[in-house]
């Protein structure tokens, strides 16, 4: 089983996740890969990633490499955070990934103003910076292939985002990761995501 790699250079990604399936872990996986390739990461969320999980995913990186991970608290106005992220992405050298984890409320409709701010950020960033927004998906009571409802999907797609979903097909470490319509089965392990 090999650790997954993702070709995401400059992609805008809206990752909608089933609760507690590893959305933050996937974001950290991408961050560790970006840093390993010489890039710098800006991470914004209401709460910092779990220290143990962070340590597991960054274990193979040196302390100097890990210093290229910059975290900020994402609370209040997303409009203000967008301004700070844009300014920081140009002030720091080699920023290649920006992750906004839990960038919207965990349930209900994503307000149009938040989607607009996310689209402004996507359009304003340098084209070689990958942008990942992680949010909880809604649950659909229907009998389709997926039980997830992607909140804000049309607005995010109009803003240039690829839609990814992450869900748990059954109990255990297996996950179903859908990248722009292409479903991949994988497993969550201490060091990140692995091909299943």
Image (spheres, grey):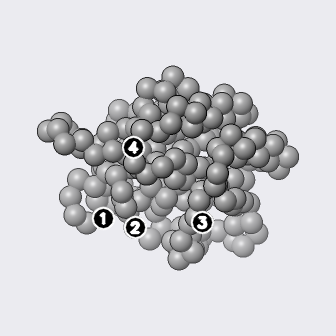
For image coordinates 69% across by 71% down, the residue present is 62
Q: Nearer the viewer, mark 2 or mark 4?
A: 4
Q: Local crowd at mark 2 within 10 Å, few (<14), some, or many (≥20)?
A: some
Q: Could you say which disc has been placed on residue 173 in the image?
A: 1
Res. 132 image quadrant: top right
Q: CA distance from mark 3 to mark 4?
A: 23 Å
Q: Name the residue that disc number 3 marks.
A: 48
- The earlier-in-sequence mark between 3 and 2 is 3
Res. 160 image quadrant: top right
> Does the CB distance between marks 1 and 4 fall below 8 Å?
no
- The earlier-in-sequence mark between 1 and 3 is 3
- The earlier-in-sequence mark between 1 and 4 is 4
**Horizontal and vertical percent position of residue 71:** 69, 60
- For residue 164, say whether it is visible: no
- The earlier-in-sequence mark between 2 and 1 is 1
> Does the CB distance between marks 2 and 1 fall below 8 Å?
yes
Element type at mark 3: loop
Q: Could you say which disc has been placed on residue 108 in the image?
A: 4
For image coordinates 64% across by 51% down, the residue present is 76
**Pick the front one: 139 or 109:** 109
Which residue extends farthest top? 158
Q: Name the residue that disc number 2 marks.
A: 189
Q: CA distance from mark 1 to mark 3?
A: 23 Å
Q: CA distance from mark 3 to mark 2?
A: 20 Å
């Amino acid at each position: 089983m090999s650790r997954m790699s993702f070709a995401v250079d400059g992609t805008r990604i809206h990752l909608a996740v089933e609760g507690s399936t590893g959305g933050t872990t996937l974001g950290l996986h991408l961050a560790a890969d970006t840093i390993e390739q010489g890039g710098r990461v800006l991470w914004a969320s209401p709460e910092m990633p779990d220290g143990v999980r962070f340590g597991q995913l960054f274990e193979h990186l040196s302390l100097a490499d890990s210093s290229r991970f910059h975290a900020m608290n994402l609370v209040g106005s997303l409009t203000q955070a967008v301004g700070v992220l844009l300014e920081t992405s140009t002030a720091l050298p080699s920023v290649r990934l920006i992750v906004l984890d839990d960038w919207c409320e965990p349930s209900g409709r994503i307000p149009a103003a938040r989607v607009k701010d996310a689209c402004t950020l996507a359009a304003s960033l340098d084209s070689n910076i990958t942008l990942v927004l992680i949010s909880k998906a809604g649950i659909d009571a229907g009998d389709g292939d997926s039980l997830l409802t992607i909140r804000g999907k049309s607005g995010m797609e109009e803003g240039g985002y690829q839609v990814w979903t992450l869900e748990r097909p059954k109990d255990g470490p297996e996950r179903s990761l859908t990248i722009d319509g292409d479903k991949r089965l994988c497993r969550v392990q201490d060091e990140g995501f692995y091909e299943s």
